[in-house]
Amino acid sequence: MTLDADGNKTYVLKPEEEWIAAEDELTLGNSKALNALFNGVDKNMFRLIKQCTMAKDALKILKTAYEGTTKVKSAKIQLLTTKFENLKMLEDESIQDYHLNILDIANSFESLGGKISDEKLVRNILRSLPNRFDMKVTAIEEAQDISSLKVDELIGPLQNFEIIVNNKTNKKGKGIAFTSSMNSDETQGNHEDDDDMSESLALIGR
């Protein structure tokens, strides 16, 4: 370091052959630290620090980038949490499709370094099912220990119940259609009888 005419500090590179032992050690330590940083980050982070010659500068850049990434990750996790808590199974949605939606959110959590426990997934599924599943939900909650129930163990019984409900609904629909058809035939027959009666009265009148 030297001082210019105005008294400002000016740093001049010292020839390597003039380095003392302490300076050799500092340079070696910096090289080792820099090499460790280069090898310890992914390709995207490496692009940020590959021009650095000082380990402390590279570390500062990585710290800033990591803090920014952490904030973004926290925001994404918060959004996923809100989406998960507000998720409801639609009336025209099947258990299988709803299960896949739940798994997508759970996988997104894991990709961000988070995790949703099986207990939380199970409780959320039971809470968010349509009213037609109320009977089955009550039966499961009374017969099972929800805290130890796995998602896969829950989905099977719900799918079986869904099949039974759908079959009953279909049979009921067919029964209504059959009854309507019979009523229509009876109505048509009544009209024909009325027509015959009108003709008979007309003949009597003549």
Image (spheres, rainbow, N blue to C red):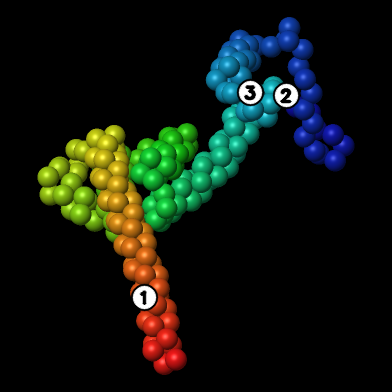
Cα distance in 3D space between marks 1 and 3: 89 Å
Residue at (32%, 49%) from the top-left corner?
166
Q: What secondary structure is found at the residue carrying circle 2?
A: loop
Q: Amino acid at mark 1?
A: Asp
Q: What secondary structure is found at the residue carrying circle 1?
A: helix
Residue indicated by mark 1:
193
Reply above or below: 140 against 184. above
Q: Residues within 10 Å of mark 2 (few under 14, many from 20)?
A: few
Give the mark, 2 or 3, whose residue is nearer the N terminus.
3
Residue at (44%, 91%) from the top-left corner?
206
Cα distance in 3D space between marks 2 and 1: 100 Å
Residue indicated by mark 3:
43
Q: What secondary structure is found at the residue carrying circle 3?
A: helix
Front residue of this view, candidates 41 and 62: 41
Location of residue 180 in the rendering, given as x and y in whole percent from the top left corner = 35, 64
Quarter of the image with the N terminus is: top right
Give the mark, 2 or 1, whose residue is nearer the N terminus.
2
Q: In terms of image quadrants, where is residue 14? A: top right
Residue indicated by mark 2:
51
Location of residue 53 in the rendering, given as x and y in whole percent from the top left corner = 69, 22
Q: In terms of image quadrants, where is residue 181? A: bottom left
Task: Please give left or right for residue 197 compared with residue 43 in the image.
Answer: left
Q: Amino acid at mark 3?
A: Lys
Cα distance in 3D space between marks 2 and 3: 14 Å
Q: Residue furthest front?
A: 206
Q: Amino acid at mark 2?
A: Gln
